[in-house]
Image (cartoon, rainbow, N blue to C red):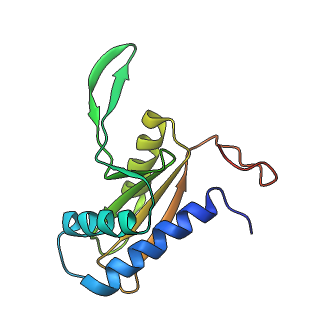
Amino acid sequence: MNLPYQELTGKVIAAAIAVHQEMRPGLDEKLYERALCIELAERGIFFEQQPKYEATYKGHFLGHLIPDLVIERTLIVDAKCVDAFGSVHDAQMIGYLNITGLDVALLLNFKTWPLGKKRILRPGFQFNPSQPPQ
């Protein structure tokens, strides 16, 4: 099955698995985020750590949304340390996707063994496998 951003998410998941195998579960999620940044940089994958996006309502500035990582200006990555992903995590990523205008988010759970991972698509995103995403 051809999924949106499959190659990019695969590279990020491989980097996260390397971090997870080295550090093991049980640490604070910010430590995993920082280790993932090191791993991504070593693999030559461009990322921004905690970029700021303006959140507005009816043209009024509300504040900043700050995702953990944005990979290649395309993919939001959020590191978690939770027993299991829940609907609250999906909702958070959908909110992030709506504000950033990006199409795909990747949740990574470093508390579980093996590494937990979940892809979230922006509602309304239309994926055409014959035309690669831009």
Q: Is residue 52 left or right of residue 125?
A: left
Q: Residue 85, position in %: x, y?
A: 39, 67
Instruction: Tell me the residue at 47%/75% (across/down).
Output: 14
Dividing the picture into quadrants, the one containing residue 79 is: bottom left
Q: Residue 123, position in %: x, y?
A: 58, 43
Q: Is residue 38 left or right of residue 124?
A: left
65 lies above or below 18 = above
Instruction: Tell me the residue at 47%/66% (across/down).
Output: 12
Q: Is residue 66 visible?
A: yes
Q: Residue 20, position in %: x, y?
A: 33, 80
Q: In this view, does 6 lie to the left or right of 15?
A: right
Q: Nearer the viewer, residue 80 or 90?
A: 80
91 lies above or below 40 = above
Q: Which of 37 and 2 is in front in this view?
A: 37
Q: Which residue lies furthest to the right in this view?
A: 130
Figure quadrant of the N terminus: bottom right
Q: Which of 40 and 95 is in front in this view?
A: 40
Q: Is residue 24 visible?
A: no
Instruction: Tell me the residue at 64%/43% (across/down).
Output: 134
Instruction: Tell me the residue at 38%/13% (across/down).
Output: 59
111 lies above or below 6 = below
User: How many discs appear?
Assistant: 0
Dividing the picture into quadrants, the one containing residue 54 is: top left
102 lies above or below 69 = above
Q: Residue 99, position in %: x, y?
A: 43, 34
